[in-house]
Amino acid sequence: MPKIINISPFNRVEGNLEIRVELGQEKVRNAWASGVMFRGFERILIGRDPMDAIVFTSRICGICGAAHGAASALALRNAYKSKIPKNAYLVQNIAQALENLMSHLLHFYVEFAPDLTNKRYISHPGYQELVNRFLPFKGTSYLKAIRARRSMLELMGVFAGKWPNTLVFQPGGVTNSISISRQTKALGLLRELLDFIEQDLLGCKIENWLENRSLEDLETWLTQARHQDSDLGTYVRYGRELELNKIGQGPNRFLSYGVYELPEGKTWFSSGYYDGKFHPLEQKKIAEYIKYSFFKGYKGGLHPSEGLTEPDVDKVGAYSWAKSPRYDGKVVQVGPLARMILDRDPLIFDMFSKLGPSVFLRVLARIHEALRLVRQIGIWIREIDSGKSFYKKPRVPIKAKGMGLTEAARGALGHWMAIKDGKIQQYQVITPTAWNLSPKDSLDQHGACEQAMIGTIVEDDGNPVEIGHVIRSFDPCLACTVHILKR
Amino acid sequence: MVNLLWLQSGGCTGDTISFLNAEQPVVLTALKMLDINLLWHPLLSLEQGEEVIGIFNKCISKGIKLDVLIVEGSIIRGPNDTGRYFLFNGRPFKDWVTELADVSQYTIAIGTCAAFGGIVAAGPNFVDATGLQFLRRQKGGLLGEDYVSGSGLPVVNVPGCPCHPDWIVETIMRLVMGKLGVNELDKFNRPKAIYRKLAHHGCPRNEFYEFKASAFEYSQQGCLFEYLGCKGTLCESDCNERMWLGRTGSCTRAGFPCIACTSPDFPDGSVPFFETIKVGEVPVTLPLDVPKAWYVGMANLAKLATPKRLKKNAVSFRRVE
């Protein structure tokens, strides 16, 4: 008889998640990921001043609120057809990059690595070292990482004033004009952050790490003792010994909207869809399904610009408050791994080509992206020209449609809005976690994380740590699974 | 040792993230300093699933003394008071909160959602969200007007969207020291020491405010009150004195308006957020406790005396004079 494991609450993720897996001979045969909370954000925005969306949508999620704020400002900018000055791109990119960077480091040290101290690994020769480093509230690296947040938080203070819930992003640019004294302060704080990264996370200069352009380079890097002894070196060594590279593959399709807008119209991280080949992003191919979600009102898929969200708590067969977004009808993964693949990042794309996706690579891609961001933030801070403007007041139409596609820490984030008579007529959000943690769709295709769980061997059903690794490798954020209603 | 349980109800995790942002003292130092034994926190703890339910049940049966219960996020009561929009281990979360609040020595609502309903209770309030003991200005909420925790205190409200990390640490400190009695709470059960100030206090744009030298567009240096929606003169908080993120910033320091996020009326009492509604030349929302006639008189006088330096700087994105 199959055995069911139910984990509720599933913690060390953002928001409220419930996980159910069915085991047959130690192997996960079926899996269900459920968002268990509905906040009805969808109804709140209808009929409001379009600008108010920046305030409300920032509060969808406390950890990626700047990304929501940026997405909604971008949707407004797109609707208003307004332009922003070069400095505004820079400040926006810095603030978004800081949020993603903080989220990635918090995820690694506070949410993911503590599972490496699980008693399952007690017989592994490295167990004591893992506990010494990563045990919550006690591990040396855990404590250092919490302290290292200071420099990132203060950097955020310089550019965004307050966080979570900054309102610095506007359709006409940013509200904050950056002086040379702020640039100076920011560069000092960044240097402090680099000290932590180079001493503790890497054991080398950030440039040395970024010179790793292939799996072979990584193996060579790992031969040096001080690299082995760093937090990342420890993860790369034990992560493979604990076989994190053999679980949690998920669908072999990846999506990124691209992020960090550049004034010339491109994004610093490229957008696209990858299914073995690279394709340009076509947002018209996005649709959301609700067969297994607690919603009613339509069959098949709807594009988010026409999305519908009518709750039905009694719906037979439904098991999640998340909808199921699909790209061209396909299940895709989003997040740092997808971004690095679509950006053709040499190191991550090489490892992906040789080894395929896994828990191990998903977590490594997240840290690698964080390191690329640290370096780029410094470049952007220096590029700000304090003598030039940061904002240009837009002309506001009373009827328009807009779309804001960006990337939050956890992956592709889209806002679609329609304005009529100067008020919000429709607003729809598809979050990264909806892509990754969605339930099954109309074709009964499992969501990405469900797929990643199926086939996983669970050694001890009383302590299913493998499931923890797989789910946390996606860094789910259930606070984000909201949908916005068309009246 | 202070046993503390932190629950996340209908919210966004923003107050937890803000708590992790504590710098003076740093969050881990604060926990040590207050001798807190964290029974469970959804983002930070190792326990999950049935282990968590075990902790809850032990608190409810008084096998563990629950000294401090912190709730973040609004309480979701819908549909039809069933609480089924948010089930926790198959049970309405609001029922867990009620039972745990019955056995706690102190109950603290962190953030505007837990205190007053906040963002989740905005507009049509489709999910029937409420704060623990208030819905907006109305007393009652989930636990009822007469609720008191073991200490005899009502729910202590520490609003803010998000809540400033220092406000959380300080409130626990005041409670543990026995320095937060009923008389130290305002009419919305917020600690007076924090919420009797205004976000306006310490705002670097105060000279512009005094002389009504106003910014017309964002990124300009002038006061944001007259045209750009700033509610700092009526928002009860110490944001601009205390500042955020290691004392590096605040809303108005980064050029965007205060939206009075500590108010029981937030967010609907603060809309539109980005422009000031006026009748003639007079803003509809005047500074706290300032009579309209006096405001008009003072504003007109101030405008006659505005130094040229302020007039120029007010509408520039950097200091030009």
Image (cartoon, grey):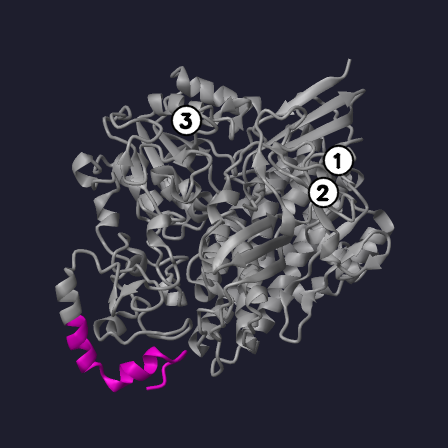
Chain hosting mark 1? A
Pick the residue in front: A328 or A460. A328
**In the rendered structure, are the residues bearing label 3 and label 2 in contact, judged by CB atoms less than 8 Å apart?**
no
Mark in front: 3 vs 2: 2
* Location of mark 2 (residue): A301
Same chain for labels 1 and 2? Say yes or no: yes
Please identify the quarter of the rendering in which residue A330 is found.
Answer: top right
Are circles 3 and 1 on residues that touch, CB within 8 Å?
Answer: no
Which span is picked out in magenta?
B298-321
Q: CA distance from mark 3 to mark 2?
A: 37 Å
Query: Are dots 3 and 2 on a single chain?
Result: no
Measured as percent of width and height from the top left, residue A186 is found at: 48, 69
Q: Is residue B72 above or below residue A276?
A: above
Tell me which chain the residue with mark 3 is part of.
B
Q: Check the image and name the residue furthest to the top.
A: A1
Residue A442 image label: 1
Determine which of the numbered discs, if any, sits on residue B97 in the image: 3
* Residue A27 sits above or below residue A438 on the image: above
Position of the C terminus of chain A, as image quadrant, is: top right
- The residue at the point 68 percent across, 31 percent down is A292
Query: Circle 2 marks a residue in which chain?
Result: A
Q: Which of the 4 image quarters holds residue B314?
A: bottom left
Give the percent coordinates (x, y) of residue B185: 21, 40
